[in-house]
Each structure stands twice: as structure tokens, then as C-alpha cells.
Amino acid sequence: MVMMATTADTLFEGRLLCRQHLRGYRFSIDAVLLAGFARIRPPVERVLDLCAGCGVVGLILAHRHPRLRVCGLELQPALAGLARGNGQDNGFAERYRVIQGDAREVDRYLEPESFELVVCNPPYRKGQTGRLNGSAEATIARHEAQGKIAEFVRAAAFGVQNRGRVLFVYPAARLGVLIQTMENQGLRVKRLQVVYSYPGVAAASLVLVEALKNGGEQCELLPPFFIYEHKNGAYSAAMKELYL
């Protein structure tokens, strides 16, 4: 196996280490937003991180909540290896594990309804649309080359227990598709936050969605989230809080 060069990046003022490939998939702000959107409170003890990549979402949750047990599921062997190493380097070996496998075949690796919470930052660029990434690893991680949204939602519904919660970060322009797909799997949207780059921008960039398995109709629409104070500005106060 060819070893890929990595960088040792940190979050939370150096308290969390996350190694990433220098030339390949590297996590983006989507992952930080998703981890920040998660509400961890009893009875949540077991978390499944679908499409884990280098493990950053699960690592953030494990760092913030010492009692959590996190399982990552990642398709690409090199990324799964990175995630596994990151868990060990941060001292989470006893409560952070990574399975290298295909979310489309989730029943091969996991028991049904074995997690109280599932988080997912899926590949969400359709086929060959948008700017293709320079590496095969990044292309698979960001484009729907080896899995569609329906398959990732199905995997989440398989893994989460009845009345458990599923969290996705997804492009705002495709929100309708995500909601419909969740409904088809018995996941009822309960909390939703629209993410904008900065105040005054015309179109939202992302949505953060929390769904409840076999939940009721009520849905909480949160205030908009702004990543930056203004165009070409610094991070907003809300965004800065996610790095504390």
C-alpha cells in the first residue's frame, strides 16, 4: 500500500488532533457545523458516524462528551485507517472504533437499531456536477459516485433505534430531496437550521436537519446560522463558538 502524506491539524486550541491526507479528502466546515448541531443528552450513549472520512465529526463528539461511544463507518480504506489512528492519538481507543465498509451494505457490519444517534455528512454533489476534486479519494468523499442520498438515509434509518435521532448536513438547494427521502424511511424532521455564508446573501448554502425515527409532526425551525460576520469577514460569533 502506498503511504499518503498527512498533515497534523488541530481543533479546540490544540486539544483535538485530526490527521488528514495532504492531497486527498480534507474535512470542511460542514463537519464542524454538523458536530455543533448535535444535541447530546441522555439517553444518547452510542453514536454512529456514517461516511466518517478521517473521523472528524465523531472525534469532536467524543472530545466534547467523554461518556459517548462512537462508531465510524467509512468506505475508503485509507480514510478509515486515518480515522482509527486519530481515535487512538486522542486517547479514545476504548470508546471510538472505525469500520471500513460500504454504508449501502450496513447490515453486513452492524446490528439494526443499535445506536441512539446517527450523524452523517454524506457525499452530496450529484454525479459529475460541480467542480471535481483533484484526487479519487476526495471525489468519492464529496460526489455521489458510490452511493446516493437515499442509500445513506436508509443506512441511517437501519442503524438508529426507534425514537432515536438522525442528523444530516446537506446542500440547502436539495433540502426537499432530503426531507422526502427521510420521510420514506420513517424519519420525521424535528429540527432544522438553514446556514448562510453571511448576512444579506441571497441564497442559503447548507441545511442542518435532525429527524426522529417514527416521530410526530411538530418541527422546530431554528434561526438562521451565519458562518461569517459579513462578506470577506471573520467568522461569526456563533461559528467561533463551535471551535471552543
Image (cartoon, helix red, strand yellow):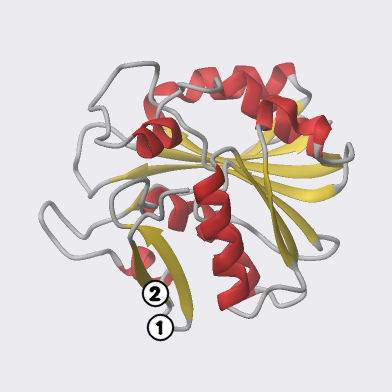
For the residue pair 146 and 191, the one nearer the viewer reads as: 146
* On-image quarter of the C terminus: bottom left
Q: Taking 157 as reference, is 140 left or right?
A: left
Q: CA distance from mark 1 to mark 2?
A: 5 Å
Q: Which mark is residue 14?
A: 1
The residue under label 2 is 10
Tag 1–tag 2 contact (CB < 8 Å): yes
> Is the residue marked by circle 2 packed among few (<14), some (14-19), or many (20+) residues within 10 Å?
few
10 Å crowding of disc 1: few (<14), some (14-19), many (20+): few
Determine whether, in the image, residue 9 is placed left or right of residue 120.
left
Indicate the position of residue 224 as horizontal and vertical percent values.
39, 47
Give whichever of 117, 27 is nearer the camera.
Answer: 27
Number of the label disc, if any, that sits on residue 117: none
Q: Residue furthest left?
A: 232
Residue 20 visible in the snapshot: yes
- Judging depth in this view, the residue of 186 and 110 nearest the camera is 110
User: Which residue: 36% across, 33% down?
Assistant: 136
Tell me what residue is drawn at x 61 percent, y 56 percent: 38
Give the residue drawn at x 48%, y 48%.
Answer: 1
At 39% from the left and 16% from the top, the residue drawn is: 127
Left or right, 158 with respect to 72, comes to right
Which element is circle 2 on? strand
* SS of the residue under disc 1: loop
| Closest to the observer, 182 or 50 | 50
The image quarter containing residue 195 is: top left
Q: Does residue 55 appear in the picture of this structure?
A: no
User: What amino acid is labelled 1 in the image?
Assistant: Gly
Rendered location of residue 21, percent (x, y): 36, 56
Which amino acid, by three-letter code, is at mark 2?
Answer: Thr
The answer to which quarter of the image holds residue 141 is: top left
Coordinates of residue 85 in the picture (x, y in percent) = 57, 66
